[in-house]
Image (cartoon, rainbow, N blue to C red):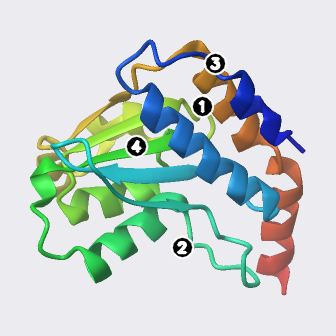
Amino acid sequence: MINRTIFQQAPEADYEDDIWARLCCEQAMLAAEENGYGVGALLVNEDLDLITEAHNKVFSEGYQSQRHAEMELINQLELHFADLPRDSLTLYVSLEPCLMCTGRILLSGIRRVRYLTRDPDGGFACHLHHLPPAWKNLSSRLSVAQARVHPFWKKLARQLAEENLVRNREKVLKAWRG
């Protein structure tokens, strides 16, 4: 398990997204401490106010495949902040969104996504051009890019994402088999 003192060793905020990176990693650590996938997300408005934050809860109550950090965040947005203009929001996430989360982001109306580290196995940010025409049209309004953060945050986000990866993949297979 990654020790929380890592946040005391964090570099000063040198990059424009460092403050959000720290909060994403704190959420990812919460997920990892709950034996889930170490992924955290947050939502920021155009005035750089934090709107809400969430972490992966796929294994919080049994197995619920839809409880990715981004999905939890969008659920909060739709339940508690329905009146916010979506096109002015930025979703920060510690790990590049998967296909399922990318679809939900597209349907939510959020226009900007910034991720800390790539997900070479399941990330979809680099594959938007593979979407069917209707979805490709929605994705033309979306700006997805790696956040401008200190390498420390990229490395920590990667470590948190990998923390329980093998064990959680085994738990998924077990849940599928019943």
- The image shows residue 77 at horizontal and vertical percentages of 30, 70
Q: Earlier in the sequence, mark 3 or mark 4?
A: 4
Q: Is residue 122 visible?
A: no
As drawn, the label of residue 152 is 3
Q: Dot 3: what SS?
A: helix
Question: Residue type at mark 4?
Answer: Tyr
Name the residue: 78% across, 68% down: 172
Q: Residue at x 46, y 26 (%)?
A: 18
Residue 164 left/right relative to 116: right
Instruction: Tell which of 21 and 4 is nearer to you.
Output: 4
Which secondary structure lies at badge 4? strand
**Gap in angstroms between the C-alphas marked 3 and 2:** 29 Å
Disc 1 versus disc 2: distance between alpha carbons? Answer: 20 Å
Give the residue type that dot 3 points to.
Phe
Gap between marks 1 and 3, in whole Å?
19 Å
Q: Secondary structure at mark 1?
A: loop
The local crowd at label 4, few if under 14, some if 14 to 19, many if 20 or more residues have their Cα within 10 Å, is many
- The image shows residue 2 at horizontal and vertical percentages of 85, 40
Q: Nearer the viewer, mark 3 or mark 2?
A: 3
Residue corresponding to mark 2: 66
Residue 120: assigned label: 1
Q: Amino acid at mark 1?
A: Pro
Q: Amino acid at mark 2?
A: Gln
- Judging by the rendered image, the residue that carries numbered circle 4 is 92
Residue pictured at 38% horizontal, 75% vertical: 75
